[in-house]
Image (tube, helix red, strand yellow):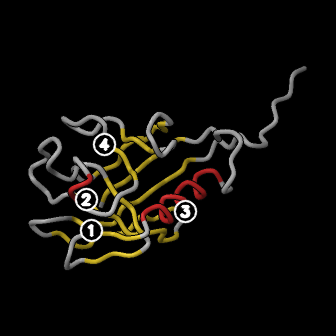
Amino acid sequence: MVFFSSIGYSQDNFTVTIERQFSSNNCTMGYLITNNDVLCYTLELPWADNSNNISCIPNGSYNGILRYDKKDGWRIQLDNVPNRTGVQIHMGNYTSEIQGCILVGTNANIDNCNVQNSATAYLKLKKAFYGTETPNSTPNKKIVVTFK
C-alpha cells in the first residue's frame, strides 16, 4: 500500500476577489480580498472596451497560474481572459507601469491614480497563497481570481 501525505499539498482553492470601487478616465481602483480578508488595494487601467494593453479586463472569474520567470520571481497570471494574454497581478505603483495587468499596494491615492508600498502588498499576497513567508514548495491549489 502507498500512502500520500497531504502535508504541504492542500487541494483547497486559493480564491482572490478584486472588488472594484472607483473608476475614472485614468484608472480603476479597488480592493484585493483573500481568505475573506481585505489584503490590499488594486490599481488597473480604466475600462476601454477590453482593448489589449490599454484596458482593465471584463468582470468575471478567471483561473490563475503561477509564473516564476519574471524579475520578481513569482506572479499570478490569469488564463482565458477574452481576447487577452499575459494578464498578471504584479508589483508597481502607476498605470504607466502596466498593460492591462493589476498592481497591488498597501496604500492608495485616488486623486493621482496610484498605489504605494507595492512590494509589501505583494509579499502579503504571496504569503496568503503559500501560508508562509519562506515557502519551500508550491501547494497544489487551484487559483481563481474574480473581478467585480
Expressed as whole percent of the image width and height from the top left, the position of residue 117 reads: 43, 69
Q: Point out the tag, 2 or 4, that comes first from the N-terminus.
A: 2
Q: Point out the tag, 3 or 4, that comes first from the N-terminus.
A: 4
Give the residue displayed 28% in from the left and 77% down from the top: 109
Q: Report, in whole angstroms, how far the alpha carbon at label 1 lies from the one at label 2.
A: 6 Å
Label 1 close to label 2 by CB (< 8 Å): yes
Q: Please name the residue that numbered disc 4 is placed on.
A: 87
Residue type at tag 1:
Met
Q: Which mark is residue 29?
A: 1
Label 2 close to label 4 by CB (< 8 Å): no
Label 4's element? loop
Quarter holding the C terminus is bottom left
Q: Which mark is residue 124?
A: 3
Q: Please name the residue that numbered disc 2 is placed on.
A: 44
Q: Report, in whole angstroms, how far the alpha carbon at label 3 lies from the one at label 4.
A: 20 Å
Give the residue displayed 32% in from the left and 63% down from the top: 93
Expressed as whole percent of the image width and height from the top left, the position of residue 57 reads: 22, 49
